[in-house]
Structures are given as structure tokens and as C-alpha cells.
Image (cartoon, rainbow, N blue to C red):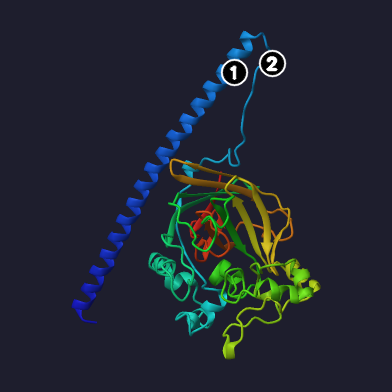
Amino acid sequence: MPEEYLASLKYITEKEAEEEAAKKAAKKAEREAVQAQIASAVEAARAEERAKLEGQAGEAAASGNAGGTAAGGGNVASNIDWNAVAPVDMTLFYPGQASFEWVQNGKTHGGARPLTKGGDACTTCHAKELETIGKKIAAGGETEPTPIPGKPGTIDATVQAAHDGENLYVRLQWPETAHSPAPFVEGGKMDPDNQVKVAMMITGTGIELGEQVGCWSSCHADNTYMPFDPGAEAIAANADVAAQLEAKETITKYLTESRTKVEVKGRRGKAQGGWDKLKSAEEIDQLLNDGTFLDLLRVYADGTASNGYLLDRRVENGGEIAAEASLSGGMWTVVFSRPLISGAAGDVPLEPGKTYTVGFAIHDDYAAARFHHVTLNTSLALDDETAQIDVVKQ
């Protein structure tokens, strides 16, 4: 190769590395400033609470009440020093109606062949394009026919993960966004009871393209608010399937493995997806026993949480989970934990020496259904610096 070309390539590579380093440094400084603001707000709240308790104790003493008043609060990760856990910068982008069928279809997605035939993961092509992709989709178009004016294309979050040999602990933080009312919902809030919701999905075994696409494997073209959403009337007309899915008005996310057929190409006007091509209950049970599911952990704005999985539908399994959520200093902080190995059906066991594909989703600004922000496939492992998310032991 000509020396001039090699020199130019070296210059461009170094320039891009410098720009990336400067971007990371700016984000780190911004994050540290926000953390300091949060710490100040938390300390002020604690001081106010201490003063309140002291006043109550003084009143009790003055009235001769020896009982006094006690107050305290637990912490989901009270044994974890988050300052010792390096944060991982994650960009969650707005996906619109880009379904699992959409990404496999060469007519709609230029990377379909590298994904389905070449073994490429989503991050192979798109890791550095998320801001551009999210902004374009959120603005409206083919993959977003009902845009929400002002909705950001991306959310910049940090993820930290740790374990104590028995439990997994995860903390997500991201800045609060300005409210952008959804024009197609009365009041502008799709889920008025939850300003935010957070989900983490862990990919099980035997899922088509599971390690390459992560939670995208459950997002189908006939889910809620998707282009081939069948609607309540069609669901009711298919009573047996509706009963097995416990579905009335809409179809939740599901895995292709739970259906006898899923239409991907949509040739000759066929509806994409396979909501009504459900396998038998016995076959579904076998898939669950085989570990073919997406482990699903969800945390809501009030700190409540649910543990479950995605297979033929979204199911809550009653598995152990603890969580908390707070908004302070303009920053959301969500912390949750679950046993590394719970034994609950639908919980992926997290073991040393194994790498898992995970995905995160944030429903910000009272969003619901597909109107969320998501990560691409992300690797997670216990005490392994080569994973994107290294779950460090404390």
C-alpha cells in the first residue's frame, strides 16, 4: 500500500481515538458532577430527617414518653461499595417498530445477511451509530409512524454490577429527560403511574440468534403497537390461543421457539410474526425446562419489582428480587438484586466462567410498550474483565 495511504489511515485512527477519549472524559466529568449533586441532595434530605427525628424525640421526652421514635430504612445493596465498581457507559437508543422480523429481512435491513448468514452481532455494525440511528427513528418515518415530538433518540446511562458470591447487584443511572407528551394518548402519558421502568433481560439457551441480538429475539412485528398487532377482535376470535396466552387486547413479547412458524419476509401480503401459531403447552413447558427463555427483571418508578421470563408470553415467576428507585438531583438511580442461582423456573443461573448476553431497556417519560430505549447485545460475566459488564465480587 502507498505510504501516503498508510500515513493517512494512521492519522484518522489516532484522530478518532483522541475524539473518543475526549468524549469519554467529558461524560465522566459530567457524571461526577451529577453524582456530587445527588450526594449533596441526599445528605440534605438525611439532615432534614435527623432534625425531624430529634424534634420528635425532644417532644417525647418533654411529655414523659420513654418510648421515643425510631426510624430506619433498608438498602438493596447496602453491602456494596459502588465507588469501587467501575461504571460502564451504555447508550440506549429508540428502536421504533424495528422488530425481530425487520432485522432479518434484507428489504428493510441492510445488515440482514451478515446477521443471519455471517454470524455478526448487532454491535458489529451499529455500536458507534446509536445516536444517529436513535435520532433518525425518533423523528418519525418508516420505522416510527407515530412519533412523539421532542422524544430523545438516545439515553446515556451508566451500569454497574457486583456480586457477593450469592447475589447479583445492578445499578443503573441516567439523567431525567424533559416531558414530551405522546400525542396519541389522552393526557400525554402512556403509563401515568410510572415515570420510568427499567428492565434487564438475560439470554437463555437455544434461542435463534440469541447471543447476537439479545432481547431483540422477543420483539415481534405483531406485538403491542407494532405494524401487525392483531387487535382485540382477532385475538378474541382465536379463543384457544388467547386462553393459553392469557391475552385479551394485545400480544406481549415472545420467542420464535414458542411458535410452530413465524413469518419473517411478509411475502404476498402475509402478516409478519406468529402470535397465533402457538406450540402446545407441553412443548412450551419443555422449552422452559431446557432453559430456552429470556430471563426478565423489571423495576418500576416506586421501587417495586417483578421477576419473570419471556417465552410464549411474558410471565412472572415469583422469583426473588429486591429493588429501589429514586430521582435526585436530576438523576434517576435504580438498583436491584437477585440470587445468582435461584432455582426458580425462568431464572438464568449466573455462574463463574460463563459469559451471558444481556440487554437493558428504559421506559422513560411515562412510556409503555415499544416506546422505550434499548441497548444492543451486551456481554456480562462474573469477575471477567473481558466482558462489557464485569460483575465484580465484593
The residue carrying pointer 1 sits among few (fewer than 14), some (14 to 19) or many (20 or more) residues within 10 Å by Cα, namely some
Which residue occupies the foreground of this view, 9 or 90?
90
Residue type, mark 2 in image: Gly
Picture residue at 60% right of the left edge, 81% below the top: 272
Residue type, mark 1 in image: Gln
Quarter of the figure with residue 292: bottom right
Q: CA distance from mark 2 to mark 1?
A: 11 Å
Picture residue at 78% right of the left edge, 69% below the top: 243
Secondary structure of residue under mark 2:
loop
Which residue occupies the foreground of this view, 111 or 107?
107
Q: How many marks?
A: 2
Locate residue 344, reporting x and y percent: 74, 56
Q: Say which residue label 2 marks.
A: 67
Q: Is residue 161 above or below residue 72?
A: below
Look at discs 2 and 1 and give the one toward the viewer. Answer: 1
Q: Say which residue label 1 marks.
A: 56
| Image quadrant where one finds the C terminus | top right
